[in-house]
Amino acid sequence: MRLTQIFEDVKKQWPRDILIGDCILWDDQEGLSCEWLDGLFWDIDTKSVHGEWGNLMCWGIFCGLKKHIKTLQPPYPNKIPIDCLDLKYAVEKINESINIPESVYYPERHKYENDLDGLLKDQVGELDS
C-alpha cells in the first residue's frame, strides 16, 4: 500500500476546520498548548483507519498543524482550515518515525511504498497554479 493513500484516508477523518482559539504559545515560542486540538488528535488517533500506520499519519498531521500554528501571531484566529498544515514538516516527522530502528514501523516499512514526498510535489504544483 502507498503511504500517501493512508495519509489521505486519515486526513479525511479530520474536520475541515480546526479550532485553535484556545492555543497558548509558551517557552520562548517552542511549546504550544491547544486543548481542543490535543483532544481532537487523541479522538481521531483512537479511531484511525489503517491501524498503527494510520496512527503515524495522524501524528504527522497533528505535528504539521502545530508547526503552522506556531507561525501565526497571537491572538490566534478561532479556526484554520486543515489544509494549512505544514505538509513538509508532517512528512518529515512521519519519515523520522519510519526510519528509527526501534520504532514499530521500521520492521514493516518494506511492505509499504513510501511515496510521501509526492505530497510535497503535489502541494507545490497547487501553489504554482
Image (cartoon, rainbow, N blue to C red):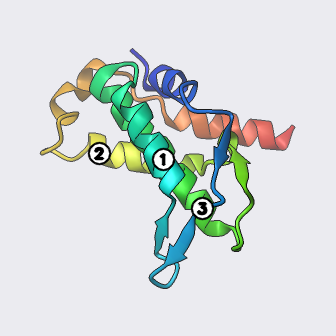
Which quadrant of the structure image shows residue 43? top left
Residue with the mark numbered 1:
62
The quarter in which the C terminus is drawn is top right
Q: Amino acid at mark 3?
A: Asp
Can you say whether 40 is above or below 44 in the image?
below
Marks 3/2: CA distance?
28 Å
**Does residue 91 appear anywhere in the picture?**
no
Q: Residues within 10 Å of mark 2 (few under 14, many from 20)?
A: some
Label 2 or label 1, whichever comes before in sequence order: 1
Q: Nearer the viewer, residue 28 or 124?
A: 28
Q: Amino acid at mark 1?
A: Phe
Q: Is residue 85 left or right of residue 54?
A: right
Label 3 vs label 2, nearer the camera: 3
Residue with the mark numbered 2:
97
Label 3 or label 2, whichever comes before in sequence order: 3
Label 1 or label 3, whichever comes before in sequence order: 3
Residue 91, horizontal then vertical, whole percent: 47, 44
Marks 2/1: CA distance?
14 Å
